[in-house]
Structures are given as C-alpha cells and as structure tokens.
Image (cartoon, helix red, strand yellow):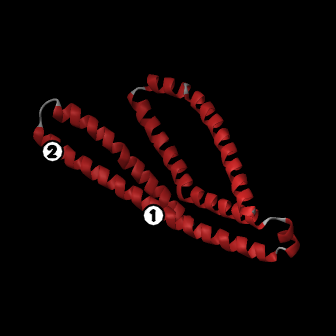
Amino acid sequence: QTLGLIGTAVLVSVTTGVGLLGPYLMGKAIDQYILPGDVHGLLWIVFLMIGVYVTTSLTTWLQMYVMAGVAQRTVRDIRNDLFAKLQTLSLRFFDQHPHGELMSRLNSDVIGAQNAVSSTIVTIVTNLIQAAAILIVMFSLEWHLTLVSIAILPLFFIIARKLGEQLRDIARKQMDLNAAMNAH
C-alpha cells in the first residue's frame, strides 16, 4: 500500500507538471503563431498540445487506478479487522446495541475510509502540488498581483470552514437517521 501511495504521489506530480504545460503552450500558440499567422508553427504546437492533454489524461487515469487498488486493499483490511473485533465482543454488547445501528455505523465508517483513501488523499496531494506550482508561476510572472491574491486567501478559508461545519452537521444527522431506520 505504501508503494501505491508513493506511485500516486509521483503520478500526481507528473500530471500536475504536464497539466501546467497546456495553458503555457496555449499562450505561446497565440503570441507566437496565431498573431503572426504562422500556420506551420501553429500545427506543430497543436500536436504538442494534443500530446500534453493525452499524457495528462493517461496519468490521471493511472493515478486513479492505482489509488482504487490501494483503497480496495485498505477496505478489505478494515473489514477483516472489524469482523475479527466483532467476534471478540460479548453477547451482552449485542443485546445492548441495536443491530441496525451497528451495521449502519460500520458500513458508513468503512465507506468513509474508502472514500478518504481513494479520492480525498489524491485530491489533497494534487491540490497542494498544483497550488505550489501555480504560486511559483504566478510569482515569476507578476509578484505584485500574486501578493494581493495571497492576501485575500484567509477570507476563502473562513468561508470554507463555515461550509464544512454545516456539511458535517448535515452528514451526522443523515447518519443518525440511517441508523434509526435500520434499527427498526
């Protein structure tokens, strides 16, 4: 599983790097080939851009494939551990806890772990690498505008935190409703 995570990090880095080439090449195409009317140069850069986008698509697919395997193995291990733990619990425990509630909580926890491993981790790593690469490019192009952009970031974090709290409350209420429905 560690190899899968390392492989995914490498693929995310490659995908991010290649993905940043697309907009760069688009700017070059406009400035150096479309405006001067260089059709031959434009065709060359179009083929290069197609290669960039095909490579980006393939590495994105590959990283999702690798992470899906990691997620499946992780979920298998979690389910096996949960089953082993349930086998050690006393009958009294099962008498005191509604069966539907236990099943609902176990399933939602396992699905949450699967989602975290398969998509959330990849999204976080991808976003961090992309943010770093974009900041480097932004600072190299126009550092004044970059500083202004960074100065307003706390506002977005505050809004995201408020929304996250609301979504967490909604998810908790939904899980309690599911548990109550399965208990009956």
Q: CA distance from mark 1 to mark 2?
A: 33 Å
Q: Is residue 111 visible?
A: yes
**In this picture, is 106 found above or below 140?**
below
Q: Residue furthest front?
A: 184
**In this picture, is 34 found above or below 102?**
above
| Percent coordinates x, y for residue 7 in the rendering | 48, 62
Q: Residue at x 17, y 29 (%)?
A: 35
**In this picture, is 5 found above or below 19?**
below
Q: Residue at x 71, y 53 (%)?
A: 177
> Closest to the observer: 99 or 81?
99
Q: How busy is the neighbourhood of tag 1: few (under 14 within 10 Å), some, or many (20 plus)?
A: some
Marks 1 and 2, the one that precedes in the sequence: 2
Position of 89 compared to 58: left or right?
right
Q: Nearer the viewer, mark 1 or mark 2?
A: 1
Q: Which residue is mark 2?
A: 43
Q: Residue at x 52, y 50 (%)?
A: 123
Q: Quadrant of residue 141?
A: top left
Query: Callout 1, which amino acid?
Result: Tyr
Query: Callout 2, which amino acid?
Result: Leu
